[in-house]
Image (cartoon, rainbow, N blue to C red):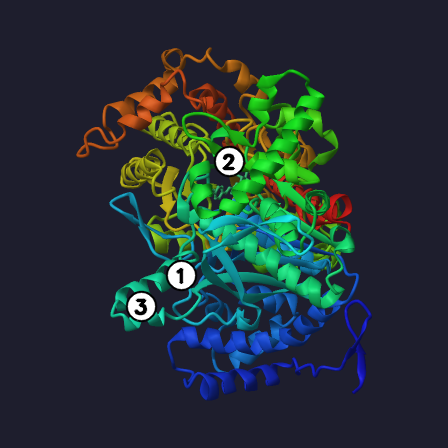
């Protein structure tokens, strides 16, 4: 067998690479379509997508296998990114770019009179996430592959992803997202690596061979975990990493003895129960407390992934656990998989027969925890009783971890029982809870926040005591986004223009995009920048027309806020501004007016009623404004249904103004803010999350900053009088009047009462009205700046040119340098 060089220069047996010219692609495409799928070119277009995906996937396989082989070599340190969410979106277009098969694929499709772009839109989004945290995991996977880092993603293969949002009469309606109903060419089932997961049962103490007492967890209900591997290609580097998603299945198809005893339905029910575990993604982007199925999902992921690592460790490293902590890191994406801390202890003690101390050394040197929230109410906690019945052995281990930890606390703060109560992993009270964040902190060698301010506030506030105990654990890793998906793929026109000027290295080394600064004063470059933006705005306007039936005029300022609907993200503040502009138009106060098209999108958690009312309010305000002839093109408002990854790929290139207006100190980072910046939008934002770093990068002349600072928000508590603010501000008064008098809900009496009450509540934690005046005045500055087109374009170019820091390549390099050390 001949040898060839693999990405890391290890000798591998030659695997035949498939030809990559357009003729070969066309041949394979046709063969897949006809001989494999049994269809012809005139078929429904999903099969065209499937045939092309299989064609491209074939060209990934050799690199996928060789990358695995390298990672399996003895001594290769690996990171396992554990996450309940991976919000991947579509894959085909991304792989085509990464494999450098763009023009070949286009040509191949043209041979059948097909357009590549149209085929790409046939793919269902893999919506295995809620929002920022899930999308971050997907961007991280992209960067790890592009940097050729041995990182394996572990997640859940939900049968149903994030619900599809429909808008009916202005209200959100949730529809199931059965994304796997048609084929998914981007997964490979690997039943040979199936694992068994235990639930329930009880504990007994037995003597082991050297007569030490040992706990056994028996009479459990067992469930199978079957892995499905998803390839993650790096950008033009022959590396293909793996995202391993687990699917639950009953241990046997159905129980034969029960079947024979005549209870067919009971035996099928057991199968059903098992498969429910991975049936559906929980659609809450703040923790939903106490749901048993969610805890099952979390343990299912943690246990199966750790067992999978142990399986590989046995094969590749002969089960030599003395090196385990030097060669493995588990990065926990929030507390969702943090039960892994206790599960790793269980596996080491109960199945590898280690002492507590040996097991703890390994666990606390391999776990690393990333926090994504500053809201105390969003910290996960589980009722002890639930743990007791579902995972009795895990609870026992958590109690032991806690007992030893509290000894350390009393060593540091002798006699301070308050400290012990407040830091305990177990929350005492009428109902006892396990505090998952504390378990994660105690069990990890690294704890990080996701933006500078967020990490600082964790150390000063939410986790202050832990920071005092272990300052060395705490660190910051500011989020990023992958420039492959969020510029190269989603904004081909801008990519072409930038590459023409500064070459293409920026796609892999985004810091180089600062070379664009040379062109900020170049008039002909500015003209080209405008025409790119205009084309992208046309595409966005088409999207809005087709989904909202609202006409966006491309000469208007495109003002966009897309993200989950939350009070702290303050979509309400945006709506108040829109109503204010509407009110000005009605009052003929339109001198030096800038036409504006406001787009809002995002999903509300199904049980979050106020968030759902906010959607209804946006819809109703839009209805009034868009149908008022006096308003015309001066102002438009649209709510785009079912905001998701593939919608964002069209939205962010076409946006002029990016709304990042959360209450300061509440948004951990934000990542949409970075996507907009890279695509040349200008931000209007508060001093919150990564906005602060964006502002620092681009300078205050290229960013519209407003609002209370995080410390001012804290100081305002108990001193906030929103009704006085309304009385003292004529503009705000009129806006509130329009809301209260039912101007936007003439035939729907009272439906916005809760929203109005929340705004004028002196205990409103989001202080929306406190920032109203400065927001409106800052928006007026935005409007005037947009009228000065050369100035606006310069700001736009500067935003893209200064976005180099916000690549996940940089983020991942920091994780690797400070935490993973691969
Ligand atoms: C937990 C338990 C039960 C059910 C659901 C959940 C749950 C699910 C998802 C809790 C939280 C989430 C998601 C949180 C999230 O997306 N946070 C965002 O993370 C981004 C990436 O770091 C940040 O940029 C955002 O600021 C942060 O809000």
The answer to whether one can see residue 656 in this image is no
Earlier along the polypeptide chain: callout 3 or callout 2?
A: 3
Q: Is residue 476 left or right of residue 160?
A: right
Q: Is residue 767 left or right of residue 309?
A: left
Q: Position of residue 681 (x, y in %)?
A: 57, 43
Q: Is residue 73 left or right of residue 645?
A: right
Q: Position of residue 120 (x, y in %)?
A: 49, 67
Residue drawn at the location 35% of the way across and 24% of the way down: 758
Q: 572 or 259, which lies in front?
A: 259
Residue drawn at the location 51% of the way across and 87% of the way down: 31
Secondary structure state at the residue bearing disc 2 = strand
Q: Position of residue 263 (x, y in %)?
A: 26, 67
Residue 434: mark in rendering: 2
Q: Quadrant of the N terminus?
A: bottom right
Task: Tell us which disc is closer to us: 3 or 2.
Answer: 3
Q: Is mark 1 within 8 Å of ligand 1?
A: no
Q: Is mark 2 within 8 Å of ligand 1?
A: no
Cα distance in 3D space between marks 3 and 2: 37 Å
Residue at the disc numbered 1? 275
Residue 401: mark in rendering: none
Task: Tell us which disc is closer to us: 1 or 2.
Answer: 2
Q: Quadrant of residue 91?
A: bottom right
Callout 2: 10 Å neighbours few (<14), some, many (20+)?
Answer: many
Q: Position of residue 618 (x, y in %)?
A: 34, 37
Secondary structure state at the residue bearing disc 1 = helix
Residue at the disc numbered 3? 258
Q: 719 or 470, which lies in front?
A: 470
């Amino acid at each position: 067998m001949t040898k060839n060089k693999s990405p890391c220069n290890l000798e591998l047996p030659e695997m035949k690479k498939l030809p990559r010219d357009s003729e070969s692609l066309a041949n394979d495409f046709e063969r897949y379509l006809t001989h494999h799928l049994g269809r012809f070119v005139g078929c429904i277009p999903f099969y065209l997508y499937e045939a092309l995906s299989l064609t491209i996937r074939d060209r990934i396989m050799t690199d996928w296998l060789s990358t695995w082989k390298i990672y399996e070599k003895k001594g290769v340190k690996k990171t396992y990114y554990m996450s309940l969410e991976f919000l991947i979106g579509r894959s085909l277009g991304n792989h085509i770019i990464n494999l450098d098969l763009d023009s070949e694929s286009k040509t191949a499709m043209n041979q059948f009179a097909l357009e590549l772009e149209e085929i790409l839109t046939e793919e269902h989004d893999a919506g295995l996430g809620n929002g920022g945290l899930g999308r971050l995991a997907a961007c991280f996977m992209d960067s790890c592959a592009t940097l050729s880092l041995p990182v394996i993603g572990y997640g859940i293969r939900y049968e149903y992803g994030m619900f599809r949002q429909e808008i009916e009469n202005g209200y959100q309606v949730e529809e199931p997202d059965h994304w796997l109903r048609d084929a998914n060419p981007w997964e490979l089932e690997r039943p040979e690596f199936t694992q068994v997961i235990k639930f329930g049962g009880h504990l007994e103490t037995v003597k082991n061979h050297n007569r030490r007492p040992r706990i056994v967890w028996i009479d459990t209900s067992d469930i199978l975990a079957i892995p499905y591997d998803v390839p993650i290609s790096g950008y033009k580097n022959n590396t293909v990493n793996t995202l391993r998603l687990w699917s639950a299945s009953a241990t046997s198809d159905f129980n034969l003895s029960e079947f024979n005893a005549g209870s067919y339905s009971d035996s099928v029910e057991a199968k059903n129960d098992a498969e429910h575990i991975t049936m559906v993604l929980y659609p809450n982007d703040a923790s939903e407390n106490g749901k048993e199925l969610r805890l099952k999902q979390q343990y299912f992921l943690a246990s199966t992934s750790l067992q999978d690592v142990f399986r590989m460790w046995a094969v590749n490293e002969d089960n030599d656990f003395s090196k385990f902590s030097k060669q493995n890191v588990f990065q926990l994406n929030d507390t969702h998989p943090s039960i892994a801390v206790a599960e790793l202890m269980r596996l080491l003690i109960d199945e590898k027969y280690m002492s507590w101390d040996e097991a703890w050394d390994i666990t606390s040197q391999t776990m690393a925890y990333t926090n994504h929230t500053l809201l105390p109410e969003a910290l996960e906690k589980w009722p002890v009783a639930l743990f007791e019945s579902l995972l009795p052995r895990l609870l026992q281990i958590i109690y032991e971890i806690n007992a030893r930890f509290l000894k350390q606390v009393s060593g540091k703060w002798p006699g301070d029982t308050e400290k012990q109560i407040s830091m305990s992993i177990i929350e005492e009270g009428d109902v006892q809870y396990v505090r998952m964040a504390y378990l994660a902190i105690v069990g990890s060698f690294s704890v990080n926040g996701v933006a500078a301010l967020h990490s600082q506030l964790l150390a000063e506030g939410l986790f202050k005591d832990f920071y005092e105990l272990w300052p060395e654990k705490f660190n910051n890793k500011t989020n990023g986004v992958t420039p492959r998906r969020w510029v190269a793929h989603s904004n081909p026109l801008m990519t072409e223009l930038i590459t023409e000027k500064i070459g293409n290295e920026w796609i892999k080394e985004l810091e180089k995009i600062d070379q664009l600064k040379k062109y900020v004063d170049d008039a002909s470059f500015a003209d080209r920048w405008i025409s790119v933006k205009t084309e992208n705005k046309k595409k966005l306007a088409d999207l809005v027309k087709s989904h909202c039936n609202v006409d966006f005029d491309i000469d208007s300022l495109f003002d966009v806020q897309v993200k989950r609907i939350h009070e702290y993200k303050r979509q309400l503040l945006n709506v108040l501004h829109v109503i204010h502009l509407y009110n000005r138009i009605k009052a003929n106060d339109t001198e030096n007016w800038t036409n504006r098209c406001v787009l809002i999108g995002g999903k509300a958690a199904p049980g979050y009623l106020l968030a759902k009312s906010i959607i209804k309010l946006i819809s109703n305000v839009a209805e009034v404004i868009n149908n008022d002839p006096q308003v015309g093109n001066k102002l438009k408002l649209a709510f785009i249904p079912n905001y998701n990854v593939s919608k964002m790929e069209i939205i962010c290139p076409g946006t002029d103004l990016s709304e990042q207006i959360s209450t300061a100190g509440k948004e951990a980072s934000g990542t949409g803010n970075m996507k907009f910046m890279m695509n040349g939008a200008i931000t209007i934002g508060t001093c919150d999350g990564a906005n602060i770093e964006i502002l620092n990068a681009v300078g205050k002349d290229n960013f519209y900053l407003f609002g209370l600072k995080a410390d001012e928000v804290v100081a305002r508590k108990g001193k906030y009088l929103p009704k006085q603010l309304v009385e003292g501000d004529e503009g705000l008064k009129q806006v509130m009047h329009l809301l209260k008098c039912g101007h936007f809900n003439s035939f729907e009496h009272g439906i916005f009462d809760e929203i109005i009450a929340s705004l004028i509540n002196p205990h409103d934690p989001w202080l929306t009205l406190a920032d109203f005046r400065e927001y409106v005045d800052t928006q007026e500055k935005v409007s005037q700046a947009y009228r000065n087109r050369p100035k606006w374009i310069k700001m736009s170019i500067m935003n893209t040119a200064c976005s180099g820091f916000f690549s996940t390549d940089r983020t991942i390099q920091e994780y690797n340098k400070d935490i993973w050390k691969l």
